[in-house]
Image (cartoon, rainbow, N blue to C red):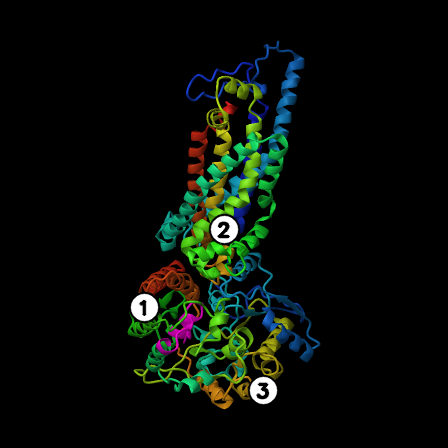
Amino acid sequence: MYRSSQTGRWPASPPAGTTARPAPPPYTPVHAADLPPLPRTRRTGRVVRVGRRAAFFLVLPYTVLLLVGGLVPVGYAVVKSLQNESETGFGGLSSYQRVVSDLRFAETFGNVLLTLVIWLPLMLVGVVGLALLVDASSARFGAAMRFVYYLPGALAGVANFMLWLFLIDPGQSPVAFLWHGFGYRTLNEVAQPGNLPYILAAMLFFQGAGTWVVVLGGGLHSIPDELLEAARLDGADAWGVAWRVKLPMIRPWLGYLTLLNLAYGFQLFLEPQVLSQVTHGLIAPQWTPNQLSFSYAYQILDTPMAAAMSVILLAITLGVGLLVVRRSGLFDDER
Amino acid sequence: MIGRGARAGVAIATLALIGLTACKGPEGTGTADDATDSGGRITVWVDPPRLPAVSAFQRAYPDIPVDVMTINGNVGSTELQQKFVLFNQAGEGWPDAIFFPSNDDLAWAANSKINYVRDLTADLADVISQYAPGSISQCRIDGQYRCLRNDAAPDVLWYDKQLFAAWGYKPPATWEDYAALSVRIAAEHPGYVTGFLGDAYAPDRYLWASGCPTNHRLGERQVHLNLADPRCERIRDLLDRLVTAGAIASTGIFSPDATELGRRLVMSPGAVWWGNFLFRDTWKVPAGRITAAPPLRWSGDREPYTSSEGGGLWGFSRHIKGAQLRNTLTFARFVAADPRWQVELSVGLPGVVPLQQPWLDKQRQAGYLADFDAAAAAFVLASTIVRPERDYTRYNTGTVWTHTVTPALTSGRSFDHAWSVFGERLAGEARAFGYTVHDSA
């Protein structure tokens, strides 16, 4: 999953840390190592054929999954979204028009964007900070802390959510003093719609941070000791090593973190849905684009509208995803 | 490899499209073309409070086999409708009888797309004729009765008899008097309230009672919705006054923090079931304090009218015939009009008129309400004057209310602001459900 960079080999002598921000050193992936050209014989021909067949079998399960779980549903959604309202024929872009003219359309995206604006920076800064601290700590203490950070993430989604319900209810919360400090006395005052982006951001941070500390820890671990030692020899202190060497080297991991969390953010469904029920409808039942799409499919019973909403969501997440991939160099090491 | 993958993809996509296009034309509201007969076994879906009805039926008709499924009783939950969409796609799986957790569920169940509930007009004419018109009129859709009411839930005026006596007040008869007395109570006895505004029934309690057109169905895709109507503006001004005076709580009747306030509720319009369910069981107000007066009326209205909060609905399947249908109709008769359920076990005032007096006699023995005879007369009167032109629609006015008005008031905004957000959102949701919104009927 974490790409071939983990198996990559670094050259023995890293560049001296003389520039302000050293670029990551070039490295040679194992599979691209220069091999002497082999004379083409019957034997090598068979090796190539066996290799191709093996590749085919290795890729096949993923291709099937991609088709069944990805491409076919996307194709179906696109076809469906172009149908007319009664689903009897071609309707052009009319379902998109109906979706965009729904007054909740812009609002749900506004809600998600606000949540992302609060949550993503919190996630990036928090997780990177914790991962660097764990990495810089001694082996045993660092491992212990990594485990502690991981604990909240080990709670499954619903269990985590129940925990949060207690946390945000001033009547039961161990941090009730915090809510009283804001002047809140009841769950409905804490969970009022204006506070929801903050509550969701906190919820998602605690749920996901531990896992990402472990992932980034893997990335930090793969930085060769020689490189770090060279940086220290060149006079970099712990801060300099973290900021100028470690951070640039785990940039693809940060891109990966941003990408997956962005996708999750745009697909938010469970948390606002359950909060809406718990607060007896204080939170709008269609608070995120995904909830709105669900409502089109199962309440309004307008499947083309639901499909159109899904296609719009897909276009947005794909667009943002491509941007993140390009800017972070996430897949660069596969060149 | 690519060729094979692409072929598989095309095959799957083609299958999906075939499944998609295999839809049928519109059907009537009687027995469906694909109806089946189990030979007698029936399946009923009920929420937990209605389980005793099924047990009572099984004792009364031991020869009819019944499968029971308990469903989520949360008002406003969407999962039930989702199940019916999938049943329609699969062509099987519908229950034979269902108690709808939320009255608005009737709107989708009778809609031409899901079209689940059968027309009962001919089969159960004898039962339907036993209802007061105000109790059954919401079941009448385009001239056909598509549901039966379990219990009548008309609004009366609840008040605390002891506090009224101690403070020297007389129960108000009109909305204008109610407002004036509320403002006076807020000034003279701070901490006491005269109403709740934050629950999904609040628009029924106040807007419906005033005749404000929020859910006046003109056709399957036509609705009369106009918050600028004078009957809306008079209730808006009244509520604005009560909110400004601090007489009415912004929390809802089901909210956990309402328990504390419920014991300091001096008076409020509220449904018949408030007596046992809220005052006695939820808020634990001691016996002998609470009683009910006839519903408030608007002094400008020629006729007295009231509204209704909930009062459950039963629906029955179009997808059955033969013995299964006969047994389901037996079940329908039992839950709507048999004293073994409606009088002995049901917590609400029976919808059918002949059973109301036996039920009231039983309540009198329980001895919870003060001044029982006056309260009982108020209940019976209220069940006959429920205001018409208020239907169950596919957009949910109560839900729109709770996520617009309640948060606005909780965060200290004015009622006027909350009202305009509510109006805009309500019309928007009606349009999103495909309704054309009309300013007048």
SS at mark 3 in the image: helix
Q: Establish if B49 lies above or below B407.
A: below
Circle 1 sits on which residue? Answer: B227
Left or right of B48 on screen, residue B240 = left
Indicate the position of residue B377 as horizontal and vertical percent values.
47, 88
In which quadrant is the N terminus of chain B drawn?
top right
Q: Amino acid at mark 3?
A: Lys
Q: Residues within 10 Å of mark 2 (few under 14, many from 20)?
A: some
Indicate the position of residue A194 as horizontal and vertical percent values.
40, 54
Q: CA distance from mark 3 to mark 1?
A: 42 Å
Q: Residue visible at 49% across and 15% down?
A: A15
Circle 2 sits on which residue? Answer: A269
Residue B362 is marked as: 3
Q: Which residues are magenta?
A: B186-206
Q: Amino acid at mark 2?
A: Phe
In which quadrant is the C terminus of chain B drawn?
bottom left
Q: Residues within 10 Å of mark 1 (few under 14, many from 20)?
A: many
Q: Is residue B190 magenta?
A: yes
Q: Is residue B76 magenta?
A: no
Tell me whether marks 2 and 1 sit on the same chain.
Answer: no
Q: Establish if A105 lies above or below A145.
A: below
> Going by the picture, which residue comes out furthest to the bottom?
B373
Asked if the residues shown at circle 2 and circle 3 are in contact, with their CB atoms under 8 angstroms apart, the answer is no
Q: Amino acid at mark 1?
A: Leu
Q: CA distance from mark 2 to mark 3?
A: 47 Å
Q: CA distance from mark 2 to mark 1?
A: 32 Å
Q: Establish if B22 lies above or below B337.
A: above
Asked if the residues shown at circle 3 and circle 1 are in contact, with their CB atoms under 8 angstroms apart, the answer is no
Instruction: From the viewer's side, name the closer residue of B40 and A307.
Output: A307
